[in-house]
Image (cartoon, rainbow, N blue to C red):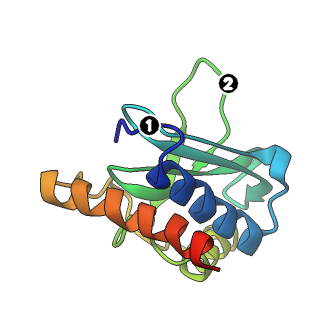
Amino acid sequence: MNVDPDSLTARGLTRYVDSVAAALVVPRHAVHHEVSELSVAYLALHRRSPVFPELDLMLLWDERHGWSVALETAPAEDPVVLAYLGGDVLAEADEVHRFVQDVIGGRCPGQPDAPPALDAEQAEELIWRLAARAEDDLAA
């Protein structure tokens, strides 16, 4: 996405990630996101899948594919994605919450493979959609 970290788009991403974290009751210290060449978010779920009870789960977001639930692995290893939500990369917080609950419940929601990355037009739309979230805060 590569936008200014102080832009409306960056503030909109903060607002969006915070809304998902609130829906999942993830404490602030367990949430990280950044706007960079590839904007991403990480939420530590401190929950486990019944299929992999020895490993914690994490909720990941990136601007190309949206949300996924993955296993917490060693820091030097790539995460092991269990499922991608698919659909809108800015899915509503309640939809993300249901997705996570389904994964934790051992159901197979979403899709096993990464959705196609956004094309240039969709990526531009994402920038404006995130900026609109920040503008909503300014208007309130």
Q: In the image, which disc is placed on residue 47?
A: none
N-term mark: 2 or 1 = 1
Mark 2, residue position: 74
Tell me the residue at 33%/72% (across/down): 87
Residue 70 position in % (x across, y down): 57, 48
Splitting the image into 4 quarters, where does residue 69 fall? Answer: bottom right
Q: Judge left or right: residue 43 versus residue 47.
A: left
The correct choice, above or below, for 111 with respect to 59 in the image is below
User: Residue 45's spot in the image, x, y percent?
Assistant: 75, 55
**CA neighbours of label 2 inside 10 A, class few (<14), some (14 to 19), many (20+):** few
Q: Which is more toward the observer, 94 or 131?
A: 131
Quadrant assignment, res 50: bottom right
Residue lying at the far top of the rendered structure = 76
Q: Which residue is mark 1?
A: 4
Mark 1 nearby-residue class (10 Å; few <14, some 14–19, many ≥20): few
| Amino acid at dot 1 | Asp
Q: Is residue 103 left or right of residue 49?
A: left
Q: Amino acid at mark 2?
A: Ala
Look at the image and tell me whether residue 99 can be seen.
no
Residue lying at 43% horizontally and 69% vertically, measured from the top left:
132
Q: Position of residue 23 (x, y in %)?
A: 72, 74
Position above or below: 78 against 4: above
Kindly identify the residue that appears in the image at 61 percent across and 76 percent down: 102
Horizontal side of residue 125 vs 20, given as left or right: left
